[in-house]
Each structure stands twice: as structure tokens, then as C-alpha cells.
Amino acid sequence: MGKLNVIVWKEVLDLVRDPKFIAGLFIPLIVFLAMGSMFSSTAASVPQKPCIALVDEDSSQASRLFAEALARYAELSCEKPNAKVVLEKGFGAKVREGVFDAKVYYIFSSTSISESEVASKVDDAVTAAARDLFLKITGLKQRLELKKYTVYKGRVLGIPPEAFYGIVFGFSNTLIWAVFIVAVMVFQLVAISIASEKEYKTLEILLTQPIKNTTVLLGKLVASILVAFLEGLVMAVGMFFYFQGIASMSSPTATTTPFNATGDILRQLQEAGLTPTPTALAMYLGLVFASLIFMLSIGVVVGAVSNDTKSAGSLSGILVPVLIVPAFFTMFIDIDTLPLAQRAAALLFPFTPMFVAGKYLVTNNVPMLLYGLVYTLAWGIGLMALAAKIYTSESLLTFSAKTLLKRFRRSRLTH
Amino acid sequence: MESKALVVEGLKKTYPGGVEALKGISFTVNPGEIFGLIGPNGAGKSTTLRIISTLLKPTGGYARIYGVDVVEEPLKVKEMIAYLPEESGAYKNLKGIEFLRFIARLNAEGSEVEEMLDYARRLSGLGERLNDKVSTYSKGMLRRLLIAATLMRRPKLAILDEPTSGLDVLNASRVRTAIRRYAEDTGAAVLLSSHNMLEVEYLCERVAIIHQGLIVAEGEPAALKEEFSARNLEEVFLKAVGAWES
């Protein structure tokens, strides 16, 4: 037991003195705190009671009782309603037959996850009020016949909010994850590729061959993109079967995307401007390419400052949570609804545009896609120039995160 | 055309952290000559070889290979040299022959690639094992593969840092034979560094002893032994660096 303690002591000391361990310890904490506050602010933005505009075309006893019941679960007089409930002529007669027949229009003002939360609160309020109505008119068989519509940018779509959210935002969230996975793969591949040259002691042999160092670097980047695309392709095939599996057990609208929508759904999406135009698609693909350049250049820098694949992996591990924050952020919060300062801060964070692009694609926001393309490309080119400078100079052989730390410690001792 | 294979003049190197590795060294290497650079650990041998190989930039002085400056025209220099670092490896997931082909294709085209490979096969002496993955090689086999990859390019100046480091007697002897045969066959110059004084005495026509970033002795092994009244090169070395205890 005594010897075991000695081994454990040495192992713990060795692990916790690694600066990467310290970073790895605190970064997840910061990430989870940020994500936690993100979710709590989203939850706080959802009103306790939804605001519903009630249109009573029947003016019957049943409709008045329903209005009274609904008032307990929702605000009925407000400037910006979350939904409109229409009780058409004959509502009372149908209630007497045991049928609750109403039209519900769910009004989406943004693409935030809070909108879907509000929609479900509207559902709860209407259902609860309908149940109260039937309790007052006892002895009748109850049946709810809600005709659901979605209102987006002032246009009424003949699809329920769940399907609308699934089609438009489910799809954009899938894009966000796809970009996240490819971005992480590309960056890790190139970082490990460069670090492995150091680990296996092949770098100096490679750099003294009669080729330019930039050619060596370019070869690594192209190979990393090809391998990442191959992995992306395999992933896409997997996702295709995954979605097919879901399609076989759910309604057709659940797996409809702006690209495979047909018939009436396609027409309605087109009318609402929710099918990507060729311009938006071109911008999006350009932005994805710029993001790849950006991630590749980060990979080169990480690989250049790592002495081996292990330290490249550790440094990559630190960066992954930094990418997760904007990915989650853009999934659950509509950046366009944030106050100007927060919106600017979010969009200036260099990783945000590549993730928010999925939402701008489905909503055809060409100016924002263009901004993302130019901004990400600027970061990509700037960082690639820095990466190329590191790769083509002796810093690649002499510089590492470890030596930087040593120099820092030495300078502290000197002072 | 410059008659010297290598001219090093007043070469200095101070690393960014402030470590002064070279304090102004000068020496020359003639075509067809095997020149040895010997010195204790940290003396500046590897830094010198890395500067000549274009990997590092000097902070003073210059190095020219057949008249071409290593800083001004690194690509031209890389076409004339081949460098084997002390600690070097090959891509573990490639087979030995694939690694050689990779290096050959960076240096030649068409039938020249196959000529290089034939030469490398003979130099390495690895036979059928060249069809195995590098990850299955012993240290000696790996070193022989790397020597072959370096010399098959037929460089005008081969730069070998500790070419037999860590090898057993048999493998070390094979490597030394390959180096000597290469210099004799091609008339190329070889610049090598080594801790093994016997090896240096056996291989090199001239040697330079480097200590704390300065050359403290230079000449033919026999002349140096006479100059330092030493029985062998090891004694010369110890006397030159001030570590001799009679």
C-alpha cells in the first residue's frame, strides 16, 4: 500500500503540473457556465403566460366560456401576440357535440429556440382552456380538433409549428453540427499531421528535400481537406440512413428539409422565402470553404507549437470547447434578436459566422452570409499567412509551447 | 565555379532565448573529402549542420556550398545537399520501399527514380525487408534505410549528424562502409559529426574539434595527434577541450 501511495503521488504530481491539464480543467468550467447562462437567459425570455389574441366569430356561450378559461392561462390583450386563436361560426354547436374546433396561428418572430418553447406554451394554454370548457359543459365526449398554422414574417403557412421548426431550424441545426464536425476534423488532422513529423523525427528530412517549405505545407493542407471530406462523406451516408430510419417512424414533414420539400409544403416555403436561392447557397458554400481555410490555419499553428501528437491532441482538446460555445449559441439563440452590442460581439467572435450560416442559408439572408464569408476569409487568410510564416521559418523547429513557457519562467526569474 | 564543396566563415548563431550556440566558426570542405566535426554535447555541432542544411539561419557569418549561400538560395542548396539528422525517423505506416520512393520522387523524375531506388536497395542491404512497414524495423535497420535515403540522392555534399549513433557494431560497420564507398564512388564531399573517435579516425581525412561554439583544433588526424602529442584522436579531443587528465 505504501508503494502504491508513492506511485499515485508521482502520477498526480506529473499530471497536474502539466499546463495543458490546468487549461483543460478550467475551459470546460467556463464553457459550461457560458452554456448554462445561455439556457437560463433563453428560459427567462419565455413568458410565463403566452400572449394569445382571441378572435371570437361565434359569440356563443361556449366561446365566451372558452375566453374566460383561456384568460387564466394566457394574456389576452398585448401588443405582440405569440399566437392567434380563431373560433369560427358554429364553434358553440360543435362544442355541444363534444368537438373543440378552432384555428391556431403560431406567430414566429425569430429563429430562437425560445419561439418553439412559446409555441408549446400556447398549445398548453389552449388545451387547458378547452379542458376547462368541457368540464363546465359536463357529460359530453371530448375531442380536440385544432387546425394549426404557422405565421412567419407575416405570411401564413399551412404547416403546424412543430413541422415548421423541424423543416427550417432542424435542418439548419443539422448544418451547424455538420460544419462543427468537419471543422474539428480538419483542424485536428492538420495539427496532428504536423506534430507527427516532429514526433517521428521526419520533419528535418522533409524540410531539406529540394522543394519549397510552402509546397510541403500546401500538400499537408490539401491532404487534410481530402481526408476530412472523405470522413464527412462517410458521416453523410450514416446520417442519410439515420434520417431514413426516423422517416420510417414519423410523419413525412418531420424529415422534410428546404431541399427535399415537394408540393404544397415547397410552395409555402418558397412563398415565405425559406428555400435557399442559388446566391445564398453559393455564399454558404463559400463561407464553408473559408471556414475550412480558417480551421486549417489554426491546425498548422497548433501543430507547429506542439512537440508531438499527444501535445497536439491536448491543445486541440482545449480548442474544441471554444468551438462548441458559438455552435450551441447559434442553435438555441437567434443572434438577430439580441441587443446591438451583444449581436456585434457575437458576430465578431471569429467562430460564430461559420455556425450561424446554416440559419442564414435557410432564411436566405444573403447580406449576412456575405459578411460571414468576407469576415471568415479575412481571418483565414491572416492566420494562414501567420501559419505559413511559422512553417517556413526555423520557428517550426525551435519554437514550441513548452519553450515559450520556459522563456516566460526564465524572464520572471530574471526580474 | 567555386572549387570548395563547403566554405564556412565566421558562422554565429544565437537562439531567441539568448543561448549563444556558435561564436564565429570557420572551416572548409573539399570535393571528395570526408570531413569530421567532433565535439562534446552542446558544443554547436548540430547547430552548424542545421545551418548548412538551410534549417536554421545564422545570426552572423556565412556558409556557402559550391559558392551558393545557404540563406540567400536555400532551394538551390537543397538540390546539392542531403541531410541526415542525428535523431531521425521514417513514416511508420509506409513500407521501407515506399519511403525510399517518396524521397526519390521528390528528387527525380521518370527512370531516374528507379535508378535511385536500385542504388538505395544496394546501399541499405535490407533486401526483402524493404517490403515491410517501417514500424517493424529495428533501430539498425531504420538507420540503414535512412542512410540509403540520404545517399541515393547522390548529393554533392552529404551532411550526416551522428550517422552511427546508437547502432551495434555490425550495423555501425555497415553504415561506415556505405559512407566511405559513397565518397569513393561519387567523388562527393561528406560532412559528418560524431562522438565516436575511432569512427572519425577511420572515415575522415580532416577533422575540426568544436567546443563551446568555437573551433579549437583543425587538421588531419595524424597531424593533430602529433600537434597534441596524443596516441589517438580521443586524446587529441580531450586535450583540445581541456578535459585531459594524464
Image (tube, helix red, strand yellow):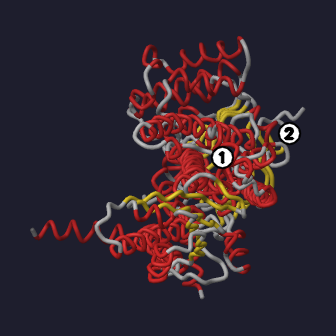
Cα distance in 3D space between marks 1 and 2: 17 Å
> Residue drawn 62% across and 35% down?
A226
Q: Position of residue A175 (x, y in %)?
A: 60, 50
Query: Dividing the picture into quarters, in which one does residue A133 lie?
Result: bottom left
Subunit of mark 1? B
Tag 2 residue: B67
> Residue drawn 56% across and 74% down?
A59
Amino acid type of the residue tagged 1 in the rendering: Leu
Amino acid type of the residue tagged 2 in the rendering: Gly
Task: Classify the position of the N terminus of chain B by image quarter.
Answer: top right
Residue A318 in view, yes or no? yes
The verdict on a common chain for dots 1 and 2 is yes
Tag 1 residue: B49
Which residue in the rendered view is the most extreme toward the left?
A: A1
Does residue A245 lie above or below A43 as drawn?
above
- Identify which residue, A250 or A298, lies in the foreground: A250
In the image, A28: left or right of A137?
right
